[in-house]
Amino acid sequence: MFDELDLGHDEQDRGDKGKHRRGRKRGGRSGGGRGKTALALLLALVLLGTIGGGAFYGFDRVQSYFVTPDYDGAGTEEVTIQIPQGAFLADMAVALYDAGVIKSTKAFIEAAEKNSRSRNIQSGTYKLRKQMSGELALAAMLDPASRIVNGITIPEGRTAKSIFKLLSDKTDIPVKEFEAAAKDPKKLGVPDWWFKRDDGKKSKKSIEGFLFPDTYEIPPNATAETILGQMVDHFLTVTGEMEFADRVQKDRGISPYEALIVASLAQAEAGTKKDLGKVARVAYNRVYKGTFDCGCLEMDVTVNYYLELTGQKTKTSAEMTQDELLDTKNPYSRKLRGMIPTPINNPGKDALEGAMDPPAGDWLFFVAIDKEGNSAFAETYQDHKKNEAKARQAGII
């Protein structure tokens, strides 16, 4: 009879995890929640007066409806907890509950809602204890001494090959293991639809572009696959929050993958943050608008990417030979018509925003004109030659 009243809490608490987000105040439930509570209490009291020796069991069940299930104390044996990037308070509560740290998700959430510092909890790995009270578990997560610091920063614009080396140096996991894990982007979490193209070119699945640049916490006993998967997951979170895929399809009329390629080009070519969108616009104009004679990108950075990809030394534009610049057998040739096969690096959020929403303009050319990295943009080759003269005068080219 008591089971039919559904007076328990633990199962219900876990089911509500999506309703509590970091920093949000809990709202009341609709649908006469108070009336149901009063009815449950009334029925429980009636039952307690009629079942004799079973009253103690019934009282415990009724009490649990009004009292948040919680442990009392600082806990028992140590346990390691991983909090992913972007986790809400409810997500943290579930992770703690699943690891046996807290008795109910509600115990942690209620403690967090009473403490404004709970918004400061960072992603990462924490050393806690099993069977902690919600309040003490929260206090431990706010204590820097509980956090296992083993972070690594991935700069914007690094190629996957370069990132594998950085990760290997940090973790002692061989580069070959990262290369092996990267061969299957889908297994790392990249959905198939990300590789679809609208330009008629064959899709090439590569992890390039999906390893989002940021600072990451390397969990204990991490593998190459789990680390790369963490980076892919962060990429999907960031682009999802930006509505990147929907907006480029609607506003640019191209596939998200093509826009990701353009973001990587802007990341490689722009010398300043303010020029990222303009460089993206140049790439769009050259390939898609039909006003650039060859319909190609004609950017030296694509040649350099191929050199790095094939284990060769990268070069400055002045060092590149004509054979390297004009080699049409190179799938990343600056003279091949249309968009290149894959991104050429892993762009950051600013570059993604530049490719998603570039400023309007008919520019087809650009060149760096000062040592601060600022570029001058031109619609015609004649104006571009004037900008090149400024660059030479400044000692840039």
Image (cartoon, helix red, strand yellow):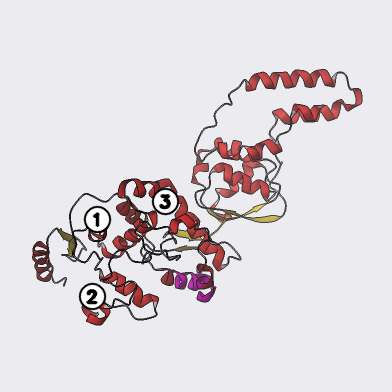
The magenta span reads: 163-179
Q: Please state, as top left, top right, bottom left or bottom right, where the N terminus lies in the image.
A: top right
* Circle on res. 239: 3
In primary-sequence order, the first of circles 3 and 1 is: 3
Q: Amino acid at mark 3?
A: Thr
Distance from disc 1 to disc 2, alpha carbons, whole Å, reads 22 Å
Estimate how packed mark 1 is, as few (under 14), some (14 to 19) or many (20 or more) residues with alpha carbons within 10 Å. Answer: many
Distance from disc 3 to disc 1, alpha carbons, whole Å, reads 19 Å
Badge 3 vs badge 1, beta-carbon distance below 8 Å: no
Estimate how packed mark 3 is, as few (under 14), some (14 to 19) or many (20 or more) residues with alpha carbons within 10 Å. Answer: some
Q: Which residue, given by chain and number where applicable, does mark 1 sit on?
A: 281
Residue 107 visible in the snapshot? no
Residue extending farthest front: 200
Q: Which residue, given by chain and number where applicable, does mark 2 sit on?
A: 317
Estimate how packed mark 2 is, as few (under 14), some (14 to 19) or many (20 or more) residues with alpha carbons within 10 Å. Answer: some
Q: Indicate left or right for 367 with 342 as reference.
A: left
Give the x, y percent position of residue 293: 18, 64
Examine the rendered structure and indicate whether residue 20 appears above or below residue 371.
above
Secondary structure mostly seen in the magenta stretch: helix
Give the x, y percent position of residue 146: 58, 54
